[in-house]
Image (cartoon, coloured by chain):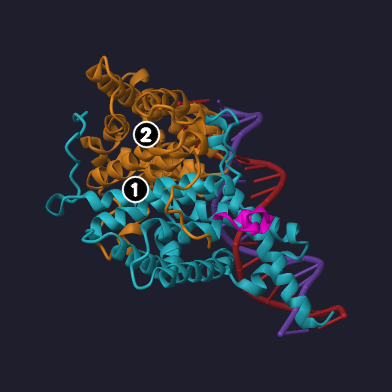
Chain colours: A cyan, B orange, C purple, D red
Amino acid sequence: MTGQETRTKKRELILDAAEALFSRHGYDGVTLRAIAKMADVDVALANYYFGPKRDLFEAVFMRRAKVLNSWRLEALEAVIEEAQPNAPSVRCIIEAYFAPLLTRSHVHDEGWKNYYALIGYVNSSHEWGGQLMSQQFDPLIDRFLEALKMAIPDVSEENLYWAYHCLSGALTLALAQTGRIDHLSNGLCRSDDLSGAHSHIVNFITAGFEQLKDMPEKKKTATPGDAAAPV
Amino acid sequence: MTGQETRTKKRELILDAAEALFSRHGYDGVTLRAIAKMADVDVALANYYFGPKRDLFEAVFMRRAKVLNSWRLEALEAVIEEAQPNAPSVRCIIEAYFAPLLTRSHVHDEGWKNYYALIGYVNSSHEWGGQLMSQQFDPLIDRFLEALKMAIPDVSEENLYWAYHCLSGALTLALAQTGRIDHLSNGLCRSDDLSGAHSHIVNFITAGFEQLKDMPEKKKTATPGDAAAPV
DNA sequence: GTCTATACGGCGATAGAC
DNA sequence: GTCTATCGCCGTATAGAC
């Protein structure tokens, strides 16, 4: 084995171990020593390759973010292409957003499972949520929102962003796979069954965006006629 | 000030400080020393009152969970009462779920803001999500789901649980107030404006549940006719 | 360059003295 | 109820082996 191969190999081992541990225990719940032990390398090696702990965390997060983004971009461009010269439907766009994450075979891969849980952690974290998620994913999100604007004529920006926020929360909670739904449903639904969750989530989120079409232009965020009694 | 009063006061100070710090940095990101310093009490006092760190965390989480549950139960019973003898609408039930959390004046209270962020952290956490959330909130959730079953005839359990999952993700991400939407929207939407988010979220989630009414009984989770091309 | 062994200053939770 | 002491583990700098 050449030096180069070793280098790459050990780097990946460290990233894999860090990913597994960070996803389960969060940034502060993991020590570099634990990562080194799991990766079967020396304590100082993580620091040698990645610098301080914080930089290692970011390296872990960024590694697969790039892959996700390319899958999703590809899917988005496909549905836009296919719908030409019309705008793609809301459902197709939402499908392009979720399917690359939830329906491929990689969802059964241990590394990806860990990474998904990590996204769940990062997205709702005060420390990382605003910064890391935006940095890695916002450019692509903007393209999806552009597409949705074409599919939902006259939608207001505010409505669109909050709808995306709902999408994001629903998705990342699913990715986190916390076991909550298993408990709530007495085992009927399983949080580790992402492909089983896929169609439920797509249907739910599609409907959420579709209702923006019915918003009166002047009172975009108001509740429709059968509004509830204030509580 | 009597001993009893001091006792209660200091207990609350510790809980407040722990809440503020846990919500910002997570369980492992906070030391008992930091909590004690913020509460201006001795390091060992938290241990004296609450036992080990883990128990303190649970005490923080449970303190306001009880309050939330009673607000929501009250709201749910009000809409059921009001709709008698019919079933309440989906919108009214969803409104009863969200309004007590998002529209009251307490959302501007620092303590409650911290607690909300804590819910965001706990719900998507591997360590706590499955257990603590279920323990504190599932009994009430069951009652909301019962009500939704009446409002959505013939809905399958599986659809209902996954829809609730989407609701939960959207809500807790909003509660986490990570600043992500501020960034994405270039400041148009603000994640600390929960009452501003309220109607957007209610509309989105209501539509998500309403579409369950159109599900063909036999293919409950399938996508409707205009299904997307697989990606 | 790649990697290991070790050392260091500091802070962790909490048990036990008071 | 309060304070202190204890012991262990923390991240990381560094010296030097290969």
**Considering depth in this image, is B119 or B35 the residue closer to the camera?**
B119
In the rendered structure, the answer to whether residue A15 lies left or right of residue B178 reads right
Mark 2 burial class by Cα count in 10 Å: few <14, some 14-19, many 20+: some
Let me know if residue A111 is in the magenta part: yes
Q: In which quarter of the image is residue B188?
A: bottom left
Q: In which quarter of the image is residue B108?
A: top left
- The kind of residue tagged 2 is Leu
* Residue positioned 77% across, 79% down in the render: A5
* Residue positioned 36% across, 68% down in the render: A142
* Residue positioned 30% across, 60% down in the render: B182
Give the labeled residue for mark 1.
A208
Q: Is residue A64 visible?
A: yes
Image position, residue B112 (x, y; %):
32, 38
* Residue positioned 49% across, 38% down in the render: B220
Mark 1 burial class by Cα count in 10 Å: few <14, some 14-19, many 20+: many
- The kind of residue tagged 1 is Gly
In the rendered structure, the answer to whether residue B106 lies left or right of residue A93 reads left
Magenta stretch: helix, strand or loop mostly: helix
Give the labeled residue for mark 2.
B13
Start-end of magenta stretch: A102-114
In the rendered structure, the answer to whether residue B143 lies left or right of residue A197 reads left
Mark 2, secondary structure of its residue: helix
Q: Classify the position of the C terminus of chain A by image quarter.
A: top left
Image position, residue A217 (x, y; %):
15, 54
